[in-house]
Image: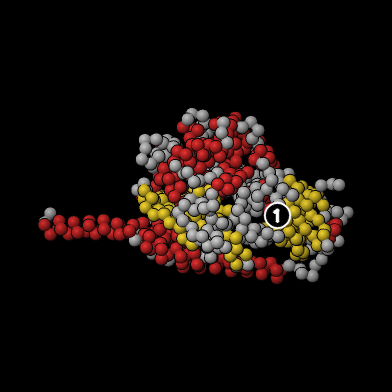
Amino acid sequence: MSLKSFFNLFAFSLFILTSNSLSQENLETDLDDYVPKVLKEFQVPGIAVGVIKEGKLIFAKGYGVKDINTNEPVTASTLFQIASNSKAFTSACLAILVDQGKLDWNDRVIDKLPGFKMSDPYVTNEMRVQDLLCHRSGLSLGAGDLMYWPPSDFTRDQILYKLRYVPLSTSFRSTYAYDNILYPVAGELIKVVSGMSWEEFVQKNIFDQLGMSHSLTGVKQLVETDDYATPHTLVNEKLTTAKMTDWDNVAPAGGVITSVNDISKWVITQLDSGRISYTDKRLFDKKETVQMWMPYINIPLKTPPPGLSALKANFSAYGLGWRISEYRGEKLVWHTGGLLGFVTRVTMVPDKKIGIIVFTNQESGAAFNTVTYFILDELLGTKDTDWLDEYSKLVNKSKTKVDEEIAKMDSLRNKDSKPSLPLAKYTGTYKDKWYGTVSVKYVNGKLYIQFDHTPDLNGELEHWQYDTFVARWKDRTLHGDAFVTFSLSSDGSVPNIKMEKFRSDTDFSFDFQDLYLEKVKD
């Protein structure tokens, strides 16, 4: 090699090293400029962001405010409800028990939990531990969620018992359909095998081991701190605070409350295949990482809009508490979480040792996706998509689509039609096998509906057409209005009610379509 060639190579290598270094050094500057624009565009009060590279937390910062009424700033230590990002914690708990020889991923659930029962005997007998975590049970999307969302008075034991009445929609292990209800079963399995509740096991075997000293396993523990974000949502396009969701009866599916600083220790451990940073200890064995990140069921691929073509993937699947897909040829292991007023995303690029954490206190998936992909492109060295602009257009297009759908429904309904019966004749108690009872009452000339185990599901029944009404929930932060259709018998009585979502963008956890409410005879 000539001396000139050597110096050219040296200069090129130095340029690459310097460029990579500058990318990290400029990350904070870039995010300080970018994230406030995201907050403004999607009406998000606050975001907390963390970035991990090569086993280190290289960036952690909060933007915006915890609560629009107090204007206290979000920091990297501010606690957020991370919702379904809790599922990976439940998966890791089972991995720890597998390492201890107390459990095997292929064990039959019924052998460990004799009271476990699905609506189909074959599924009951063949359900394995791994099946509880990968959404291939045959249940429909969000099946049974109304037992705990909005918050109900059902106990975990009651929910586990009622599982036997929740209908299946597909054959076992044939189709991906996201559910929450099987994660409490996994939580009960942890309790039976370890002798500790899910909360105790997570605290002792994960939080304490990783030094996640500020993380919590339920809303009731928030009395111990005041550094937590308030949930926010849009009501008639106006930002408002919402109630904190108490999901303690389904905590293994969504109960973890944590901060960017704390969860970064979890992500670093995940990226190091279970090894606890700076120690020789392990949270779980390497082979368990393989199990948890293995594609157990394929998720159908969707073609992204033209402006988001960078999101086109060659595969998408679900593992054990994690989604597995690709981005620009890189394997991604990731998950999202959503509760009233919160949406979160945790993303890992294992081969690059990259981790990205984005927590928000408003229900804007566009916001956490915009920030996540902006950071990914910064670290991967690719900047060919204006994520803020493209997600903004996508949100506006989706809103327009839903508005048009509602306008079309309204134009097609018979506004001159009347209910078949006097309103008082629709009243009574109606019972579904898995949910329980729903009451319809006549008060001051109007009909009202109340889900008896769910205080927040109460509202007026507004006539739509014929014997169909729309339940307008009193709590307008719920965004879950529903059609309520009363059937009529030949004698003019009302034997049952069926329900369905009013808007196509209603969260899947409002699984009204799975209810079959039969009138309870006096």
Can the viewer see residue 516 in this picture?
no
Can the viewer see residue 159 in this picture?
yes
Crowding around mark 1 (Cα neighbors within 10 Å: few <14, some 14 to 19, many 20+) is many
Question: Which residue in the protein does label 1 denote?
Answer: 457
Q: Residue at x 73, y 56 (%)?
A: 458
**Left or right for 392, reference 420:** left
Image colouring: secondary structure
- In the image as oriented, which residue stretches furthest toward the right? 491
Q: Position of residue 47 (x, y in %)?
A: 48, 58
**In the depicted structure, whether residue 400 falls above or below residue 483:** below
Q: Residue at x 81, y 56 (%)?
A: 441
Q: Residue at x 57, y 36 (%)?
A: 197
Q: Position of residue 226 (x, y in %)?
A: 54, 52
Q: Quadrant of the N terminus?
A: bottom left
Question: How many numbered marks, from 0 up?
Answer: 1
Nearest the viewer among 154 and 468 is 154
**In the depicted structure, whether residue 261 falls above or below residue 505:** above
